[in-house]
Image (tube, rainbow, N blue to C red):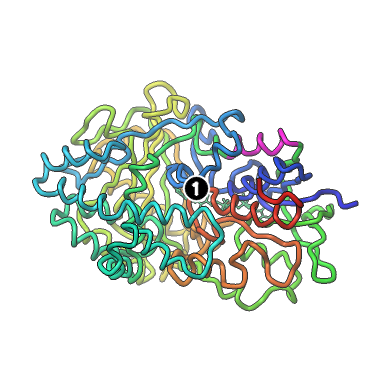
């Protein structure tokens, strides 16, 4: 008798989702996580007394387009989502505007501030909402070979595909220009689209902009107590169905015999056997744990790129106060802080040359505005996500250049909210190197692998591994951002992988 039905390597949110579905189906599940807490890039800790910091993702958007929270009854296991509305606070420093969950209100306010642009925003939503919905549908199933076609036909019910297709194939920067003549509207939308990594000039990247209507559909949310509220609830769901979650338990080897995964060996030498092994770790980490003869060349050829983002997380003694401030709206949503499109392109140019951006555009997040458990009364947590930052630098190392990058992020923020630096009482600087060392994100890529079309859908992580199964090793399954549909707090990969696993392991299959 094996020790478990299913062994799960890593307790990132996707791995926990797979584990929770497997435990709910009656399988005996054991999760083994390298770190001292669950969640990987969706985890939270009190790093400064009284202040809770997220380690990775903070804006819960995509998971709201999946049935994961409902199906796994995560509310019953302690997950409490707080709505973030307005969802975005866009600003060049002089003229802030807001994206509300209510699209009509957003259109009205935009039209009043920038005549013509509210109408353009409404037209953009009308044109692309069907497409965005069909993208969300694709996220929730294992990838087949014809996704692009399905996406296109899904947009506008197939009526308008001859007009839509060329736009989908374009760089998102170009599509934004087609709709929005006012740069103060266009630049923040382009900056939000840039969050997946590829720059606005990348061919075939338009979907990163075209799924914007999804924000109005599902909204932006925060688990009460921090991002880790999601993964803590997932852990409770696993345990409630008899599963075990082991922390400080790094997996050293995936044991393979006769072409079949047999179990795992931990760093401390303990071994456990199972009918199936699921890895939710980065695909290169999974490859590193396998006997070399079971690692195909394609596994070593996946592309992480050269990092792209870094975060300065701050504990503040006072609330953020923007130069043009609306209380509390300015502090609630994700601050899309960008002076103009040139700022983003210049940053990308510096990055290509191996240099950290000197004047980065920012996503500012001060979620203590919606969750008073994150900071002491009157205080604030402020997280500043910035792009672009090479993992491999042209000169120096992250140890020697981290302070300079940190200072440039802070200086960039002071353009919007001067005086912030005087209120800092604690901080965490997450360089691309930090993200690799602490979160296991190879080369600092928060999406595991580059999110370019050659590594999306049925090509993620590579063609013969795209169905959540490791090719050539029976009983070894994959989940996580290295697989379809990629990075982000979504859980769709975890759910899709569970579907494949349960079909193989239980006669009942998916319920
Ligand atoms: C700084 C940052 C900001 C982000 N912001 C957002 C955001 O606002 N919104 C959004 O949607 N997304 C965001 N993301 C992206 C998103 O958080 C990640 O893409 C996603 O959480 C990845 O989840 P995962 O479960 O696929 O993998 P991971 O979270 O990478 O989990 C892998 C797990 O495996 C463990 N592991 C590795 N090796 C071993 C081993 N040998 N043995 C045992 N365990 C092991 C790791 O410790 C980790 O817990 C952000 C990410 C980062 C890092």
Q: Secondary structure at mark 1?
A: loop
Give above or below for 507 relative to 218. Answer: below
Q: Residues within 10 Å of mark 1 (few under 14, many from 20)?
A: many
Q: Which residues are magenta?
A: 231-241
The answer to if 233 sits in the magenta stretch is yes
> Which residue ends up furthest to the bottom in the rendered image?
297
Residue picked out by circle 1:
489
Q: Nearer the viewer, residue 104 or 7?
A: 104
Q: Nearer the viewer, residue 312 or 145?
A: 145
Q: Nearer the viewer, residue 179 or 313?
A: 179
The answer to if 58 sits in the magenta stretch is no
Q: Position of residue 338 (x, y in %)?
A: 25, 51
Q: Residue at x 72, y 36 (%)?
A: 239
Q: Residue 16 vs residue 155: left or right?
A: right
Q: Quadrant of the C terminus?
A: top right
Residue 68: quadrant of the picture: top right
Q: Position of residue 216 (x, y in %)?
A: 33, 42
Q: Name the magenta segment's main secondary structure.
A: helix
Q: Is ligand 1 within 8 Å of the beta carbon of the residue shown at mark 1?
A: yes
Q: Position of residue 359 (x, y in %)?
A: 28, 56
Give above or below for 69 relative to 155. Answer: above
């Amino acid at each position: 008798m094996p020790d478990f039905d299913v062994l799960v390597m890593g307790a990132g949110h996707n791995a926990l989702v797979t584990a929770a579905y497997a435990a709910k189906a009656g399988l005996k599940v054991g999760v083994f996580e390298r770190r001292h807490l669950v969640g990987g890039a969706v985890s939270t800790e009190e790093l400064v007394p009284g202040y809770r910091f997220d380690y990775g993702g903070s804006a819960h958007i995509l998971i709201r387009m999946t049935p994961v929270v409902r199906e796994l009854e995560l509310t019953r296991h302690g997950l409490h989502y707080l709505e973030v509305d307005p969802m975005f606070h866009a600003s060049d420093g002089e003229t802030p505007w807001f994206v509300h969950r209510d699209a009509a209100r957003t259109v009205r306010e935009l039209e009043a501030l920038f005549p013509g642009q509210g109408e353009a925003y409404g037209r953009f939503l009308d044109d692309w909402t069907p497409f965005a919905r069909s993208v969300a549908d694709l996220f929730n199933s294992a990838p087949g070979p014809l996704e692009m076609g399905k996406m296109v036909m899904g947009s506008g019910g197939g009526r308008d595909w001859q007009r839509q297709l060329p736009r989908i194939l374009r760089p998102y920067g170009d599509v934004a220009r087609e709709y929005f003549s006012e740069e103060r509207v266009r630049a923040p939308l382009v900056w939000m689209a840039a969050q997946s990594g590829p720059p606005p000039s990348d061919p075939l990247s338009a979907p990163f902009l075209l799924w914007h209507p999804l924000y109005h559909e599902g909204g932006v949310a925060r688990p009460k107590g921090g991002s880790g509220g999601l993964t803590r609830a997932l852990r409770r769901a696993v345990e409630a169905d008899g599963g075990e979650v082991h922390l400080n338990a790094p997996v050293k080897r995936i044991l393979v015999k006769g072409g079949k995964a047999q179990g795992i060996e931990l760093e401390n030498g303990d071994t456990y056997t199972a009918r199936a092994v699921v890895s939710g770790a980065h695909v290169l980490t999974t490859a590193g744990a396998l006997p070399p003869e079971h690692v195909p060349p394609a596994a070593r050829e996946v592309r992480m790129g050269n990092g792209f983002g870094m975060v300065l997380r701050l504990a503040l003694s006072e609330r953020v106060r923007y130069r043009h401030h609306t209380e509390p709206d300015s502090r609630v949503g994700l601050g899309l802080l960008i002076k103009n499109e040139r700022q983003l392109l210049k940053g990308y140019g510096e990055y290509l040359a191996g240099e950290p951006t000197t004047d980065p555009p920012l996503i500012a997040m001060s979620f203590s505005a919606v969750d008073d458990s994150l900071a002491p009364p009157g205080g604030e947590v402020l997280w500043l996500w910035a792009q672009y930052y090479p993992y491999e630098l042209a000169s120096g190392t992250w140890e020697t250049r981290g302070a300079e990058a940190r200072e440039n992020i802070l200086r960039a923020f002071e353009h919007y909210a001067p005086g912030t630096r005087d209120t800092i009482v604690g901080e965490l600087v997450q360089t691309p190197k930090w993200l690799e060392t602490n979160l296991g994100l190879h080369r600092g890529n928060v999406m595991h692998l580059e999110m370019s079309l050659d590594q999306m859908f049925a090509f993620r992580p590579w063609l013969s591994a795209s169905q959540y199964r490791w090719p050539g090793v029976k009983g070894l399954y994959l989940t996580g951002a290295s697989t379809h549909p990629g990075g982000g707090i979504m859980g769709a990969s975890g759910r899709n992988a569970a579907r494949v696993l349960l079909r193989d392991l239980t006669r009942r299959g998916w319920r």
